[in-house]
Amino acid sequence: SDGSGASNRPYSSSGRNPSGGGTSLHPERGAVLRAKVLYLLGLSLLRGGNVKGVGDSFEASYDVAEKALEDASDIGESGNTPSVTHKRAVDVLKDTIKGATEGKLTLQEYDILKTKLDTGSCKKDFIDVLDGALEIAPASMEWQIAKVRHLIGRRRWFVVANHCEQVAAKMVKLDGIFTEDLADLDPFPGIPPVQELDPDFFAENSKYDTPLHLRTLNPKATRDAVFRMPKEILPYYLRALRLEERYAEAVLVGTALVEFDTKAKAAGNDNFAENKRYTREWERLDNTIKMKEEGDSLFRDAYYDRAVALYGECLDIDKGSADFDGSSSSILRQSSSWPVARSHANDAGGKLHAVLHSNRAACFTSMGRYEDAVKESSHAIEIHSMYTKAILRRARCHAKLGQDEKAKADFNRYVMLVEGARDHPYPPPNQGSACYFDMPSNVSEEQLYQVKSEMNELGIKPIETRNNQSTTRSPIASVGQSKKNWLDKLWCCKNNAASQVVTSPSYRRPENDRTRPEGGSNQQPPIQPKRKVSFKSTRQARPPGAIPPPQSVSPPDPPTKKVAPTIIKSRAAFDHPIDASSVVVDPAMDYYGILSLTPSASDSDIKQAYHKGAKENHPDRNNTKEAQARFLEMKLAYNVLGDTEKKREYDKANAPKMDP
């Protein structure tokens, strides 16, 4: 053999035709086998992203196959009839020469792509270049991790999970290959057998109608996938499941990994155990589920200020953990900042944080704090630019604030998105919003008609779309055909989502549109009966007809099952709700101003002002939305100023602002 791996004897003398006049070839022996093995060696190295020796392997394969073909041609010249086996071997050699030639060209293309990625000269088309490199070298961990991190940088957690699941589905085809003498090469030794995961689930020509970039595995399939996923990208996948609110999958996967880890440690194999990031992710999953459930419970019982605080604490779970750098920070924030709208959206992104911002907006709307509701809705839209519920809520809040132009912009944006999605329900890959829940395609014709009717009541004329047809038609009217370039402009819109905002001073919310946190279905909520608010501070059970809790929005199923005890541990603060009198003291709130008092007011003045204002705005006397919001604000103010300790805390925090 020479240094390139090619033999100086390209074929064995045992293949010589006994009648003379050339070489009789066999497709699985001698030169044919050597040429094929050299070609497959180069191809395997290239698919793994290892370019060293790839060119030599392709070159040696080409030389061996060409030499064998030249020598085998003597059979035809000598007049001997080639056998069927010989003909098949010749076909194999021709295919090998063709494959080696294409392999050398592919190697040149890969070198160009790799150079661009290594030098950073492809910032504008980075994802296209990276996808090209992955198409040639799908087993390269360098490029797999680079793509996952790039998607995380763009806060596209749905795509992160989709990409990881596609990788795992392809690995299913390797099950059962690494046996006997190949057992030492098994990348996933000892993993459970496949039960649910279909290796063709993400194939282009599969039986599934949904585009492959929008497909998600069911919980049982994710359990199979997680064991066939490279360890380098597994932590990102686990976090993506949580941030996309796929709690059922996250818990099932976590439980399966814990069980496997326990057995592996007992057998002296800790393949999945060495990374502490898994443990931190279980803790975040625990905190996320419990905080969000408690926040939903508080919202159902109309404790909006405390629900806002808990949703805010849930937002901070991912603070300082975006890069998995091992650093840790407290998830707690100063209580004074909780009931105030955030100054910016959560940096991690994902469905979870979009919903949390939207839930906080729902709380602020119920409290009559429409400016804060606009800010939180804008944060939700910044994460998910096609979040129809958040867009609609922001439009209505702008209307309440008398910001007519902004209300018009948001209402029309809602109509444009929904109309455009009628003909193009699926966004193209790597374009449009970072999230894929509560999309415009989920809005029914009836819901769209109700929004247009609401716009007409506000004096806002819906924009004309879909071949300039009027958008004020009823939900049973025929749907026209949109222009071909309509959705292209829609998905590729580069306007900042947070800058497109919108309301009218004469705005009146429809009776069947009660504000509630996001996460439920897209159907309009039923008409709610008037709820009587008690002066008692003790927390009461939810009365009939109260606002329904926020639920998980998209498939897979919402987390209705109890979380596995191996992952989620009980938290006393959530298992035993705090007393209703324990409200959060917010120094940013003007509690004295709400009661029309000054900081020098006595306890009797505070009590008298509260009872006077509560009597005027009580729902039994005044059932307008403004009066209800005013009543809740006065109740909140009295809960702080009527309590000696809380009043002292509030006065101390605002001492520099108060008159001497």
Image: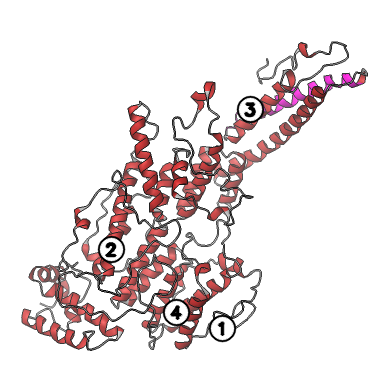
Question: In this rendering, would 175 be left or right of 37?
Answer: left
Disc marking residue 406: 4
Residue 386 point in image, percent of width and height = 49, 67
What amino acid type should be assigned to the residue bearing mark 1?
Arg
Graded by Cα atoms within 10 Å as few (under 14), some (14 to 19) or many (20 or more), the crowding at tag 2 reads: many
Number of the front mark, 3 or 4:
3
Residue 604 point in image, percent of width and height = 6, 82
Residue 174 versus residue 438 in the image, above or below: above
* Residue that numbered label 1 is attached to: 473
Residue 589 versus residue 383 in the image, above or below: below
Graded by Cα atoms within 10 Å as few (under 14), some (14 to 19) or many (20 or more), the crowding at tag 1 reads: some
Question: In this rendering, would 383 be left or right of 6?
Answer: left
- State yes or no: residue 211 in magenta: no
Q: Nearer the viewer, residue 481 or 134?
A: 481
> Closer to the N terminus: mark 3 or mark 4?
3
Number of the front mark, 3 or 1:
1
Residue 606 point in image, percent of width and height = 10, 81
> Closer to the N terminus: mark 4 or mark 1?
4
Question: In this rendering, would 451 be left or right of 654?
Answer: right
Are the residues tagged 2 and 3 within 8 Å (C-beta)?
no
Number of the front mark, 4 or 2:
2
Disc marking residue 295: 2
